[in-house]
Amino acid sequence: MTTSSEIPTLPTAKSGDLSLAYETFGDPGDPALLLIMGLGAQMIGWPEDLCRQLAQEGLHVIRFDNRDAGLSTHLHEAGRPDLRAVAKHEAQPPYTLTDMAADAIAVLDALGIEQAHIAGGSMGGMIAQEVAIEYPGRVLTLTSIFSTPASGVGKPTPEAQAALTGPPATTVEEAGQRAVQNAAVFGSTGFPLDEERVVWRAQEQFRRANDPAGFARQLAAIYGSRDRRPGLAAVSVPTLVIHGEADTLVQPEGGQATADAVPGARLVTYPGMGHDLPAQLWPDYVKEISALVRSV
């Protein structure tokens, strides 16, 4: 884990007027694995050690900051959306998950990658699904982790919803405290909490870019996007769905519905896994994703 003083200057990809910061691990000659992170999260939500373990399996691993997150472009001029109106389809979001899928393709374009294995977690899984639907020729395999094909499927428990949408942290210290509190609500109850890692990641994200309005714009993209099940029915690439049986933020129905929507998809669930990536399961994730890559 790096300290705040060591935040690197990263290369960027252009998606229209937006700049998307990205980072790579492994040999560029190996098959590409594009990792897409979730709501309000940043590329560092994909732990560096996990990325390196995937790279050691012969993958060129790419992680990036979504629009309105981290070191990528923030659409400040779009303001804060009316989430209630967007959820009721009475207002349009500033952008949709389909737009964010185009950002993911822009990262591949910047690296000169024609086809890649695509994996996403939570909102990133939703974006990965959109990539598979909208850009089938660019996708070799799809991995959807603790995600859902529609915002109404696998909805969070009231407690998890309250934790997700509570008042944003206003200091670095508060960001760390809030992350630990949230982990108790929707984290992996079946595994010991790595509090040091949780605090570090939350504080580092705060230092890299603290943007509550950007979080709201991403949430509006989720609320305002389509049900992907009809599109997923046409996805023909090998697909892996990973979900935690203790996930209260995107409940297991979301993973089941994703797997049901994609013909031939493999669903893998873990007891005690919540809405995070416990280190104890990294070897399993690496094994499953590597096997999926080798299947094509």
Image (tube, helix red, strand yellow):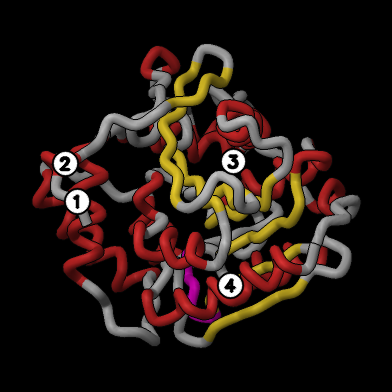
Point out the tag, 3 or 2, that comes first from the N-terminus.
2
Residue type marked 4: His
What x and y, as percent, mark residue 232?
A: 82, 52
| CB-based contact (under 8 Å), mark 1 and mark 4 | no
User: Considering the numbered disc 4 on the image, is that residue within a helix, a strand or a loop?
Assistant: strand
Residue type marked 1: Thr
Q: CA distance from mark 1 to mark 3?
A: 34 Å
Please rate how many residues cluster around mark 2, counting C-alpha atoms within 10 Å: few if below 14, some from 14 to 19, many from 20.
few
Foreground: disc 1 or disc 3: 1
Residue type marked 2: Glu
| CB-based contact (under 8 Å), mark 3 and mark 2 | no
Q: CA distance from mark 1 to mark 2?
A: 6 Å
Residue occupied by mark 4: 243
Residue 280, above or below 40? below
Mark sitting on residue 223? 3
Residue occupied by mark 2: 6
Foreground: disc 4 or disc 2: 2
Q: Quadrant of the N terminus?
A: bottom left
